[in-house]
Amino acid sequence: MIKKRPSIQDPAAESQMFNQRALFGFAVVLICFCVVVFNQYKLQVVMHEHYMTRADGNRIKLIPQPPNRGLIYDRNGILLAENRPIHSVELIPEQVKNIPETLAEIARLIEITPERQQEFLKEVKYHRRFVSIAVKEHLTEQEVAIIAVNQHRLTGVTLEARLTRHYPFGELFTHALGYIGKINAKELAKLEEEGVSANYAASRDIGKIGLERFYESQLHGQVGFEQVEVNNRGRVIRILDSKPATSGDDLILSIDMSLQLKAQELIGENRGAIVAMDPRDGAVLAFYSNPSYDPNLFVHGISGKNYRELLNSPDRPLVNRVTQGVYPPASTIKPHMAVLGLENGTVTEQTRIADPGFYKLPNYSRAYRDHIKWGHGWVDVYTAITKSCDTYFYDLAVKLGIDRIYDYMKKFGFGSRTGIDVMEESAGLMPSKEWKRARHKQSWYPGDTVSLGIGQSYWSVTPMQLALSTAILVNDGQRPTPHMGRYFRSQGQDTSLIAPLQTAMEVKDHNNWRIAKEAMRQTVMVQGGTGFNAFKGISYSAAGKSGTAQVINMAANQKYNANAIKEIHRDNAMFIAYAPAENPSILVTVALENAGGGGANAGPIARKMMDHYFTRQSAAGAQP
């Protein structure tokens, strides 16, 4: 009998196993399918906006567009600050893997000084990484061609054409207009603090000094943008939307170009300042500080060498002498002192004192000299101002006392900024007992008051302060606000910058103003006045006052000899004048450093400034 072999297959078990595996596989597939469906739902429905935004971020870019800076004109429409096109090679930090290496490659193609390379690497640290930074500006046509040919291998490097500031008259208007320059880290932080940094997203420059800084917000304009679609290489395919930038407002000044040129011509090689102003409203007609410098050097980043030369120059060209130069006012403040003496009743129109050529304090042996050794004889207020009698004002100052002088002269604006539309302004110094005690740890001595009577001692003023104080006197106590900005023009609409007159001081008797002004008229119109020789033969009426300010103290018996002392220790020449004397339309202040006598040196300049002004007025058919 044949024995049956046992069966190796188990169809029932295999069927069961197959069913289990098929079920497991189906479950896995189903789970995977559910996961896919869920993810699709999440991506396309739940996260749709998020990923759409990210996709658009790769595809769409918002490019800020810089506004054109407002132009600046003189009162007659002559362009003083313009925008000129330039080419520059620029680098976008976020698109460059190795910035120093790329910079070195650019430097091999075109000339870039090592100093500029170091400056650029510093700029990269505080600039936004998505904003392009100029490596070199003012490219020549040859340099543009070289960069264009090699641009394909310089990732993140672009050639740009844009407008930049230019000052066609160079150093003539530097201290008035100022200049713009690259935004630094401190300025960027200030913009962010003020909440206006977004408006500078496409701007590289900002007003640094002068009118450019004072009126920065109006001159700058409003940033625009372009929404563009780009490919995977970052190249623009098309523009999707745009909002054009709004140009800054144009600024029209009160400054007269012709008068400014005359001031530059007249001051010559002298260090000093000339300011001409309309006392009726404070409009500045000329604003010149000498020596000056070319502001265009600063627009694109001045070299370290050039900046050190300006900074270390003994002539201090960087100082705006109109508003920052401080000088003893000397005898130019005698009319102001006279008004105080008359108003206080210390002197009257008829009061006379004997001038033997010196003044002595009671119980003191020191003699304070008059500028005329033998004196002026009997002197009243008219003679004291007209012939600049020091003895009269020594005596008047002592009788008034420092407290009265301080309180009253503050009303004339001494010791305070004038408020003119530049940031760079000194307050000068109107000394007081409290100031001396705090500054020098000393008491105020009677001798200090004596010298204060003739504008010496610790008293210091700026030429602009002197002009303003004279305008207050001319206007019988009404104070104009000095301004170079006349109005802004935007889309044909003008916005005036002229402020109304304000009351600086009230007097008991308005005749006191008349007395001081009549004495100033006699100073230049009557023979014997300290300004007569300078104004001899004028065709209009004028008034003024000279001043000769000592730079160093001299011994009581020491005779001043300009040739025997260093130039920097010689007297400063000061002069204030206005015309016509009855109804002034121009007021001129001249300050010349180490030039000598005010009547002889500063007076003729003031006269020629006025001659030029009235000649132009006559040519234009206007009445002085």
Image (tube, rainbow, N blue to C red):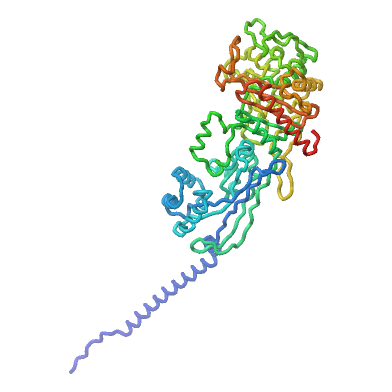
Please say whether residue 455 is visible from this viewpoint: yes
Q: Residue at x 65, y 52 (%)?
A: 246
Number of numbered labels in the structure image: 0
Residue 191 rendering spot, x and y as whole percentages: 58, 44
Residue 457 rendering spot, x and y as whole percentages: 62, 17
Q: Is residue 24 above or below residue 418?
A: below
Q: Quadrant of residue 455?
A: top right
Quadrant including the N terminus: bottom left
Residue 63 rendering spot, x and y as whole percentages: 57, 56
Q: Residue at x 79, y 20 (%)?
A: 515
Please say whether residue 255 is visible from this viewpoint: no
Q: Is residue 91 above or below residue 484?
A: below
State the residue in front, 460 or 596: 596
Q: Residue at x 50, y 54 (%)?
A: 142
Residue 401 rendering spot, x and y as whole percentages: 69, 14
* Residue closest to the far front: 537
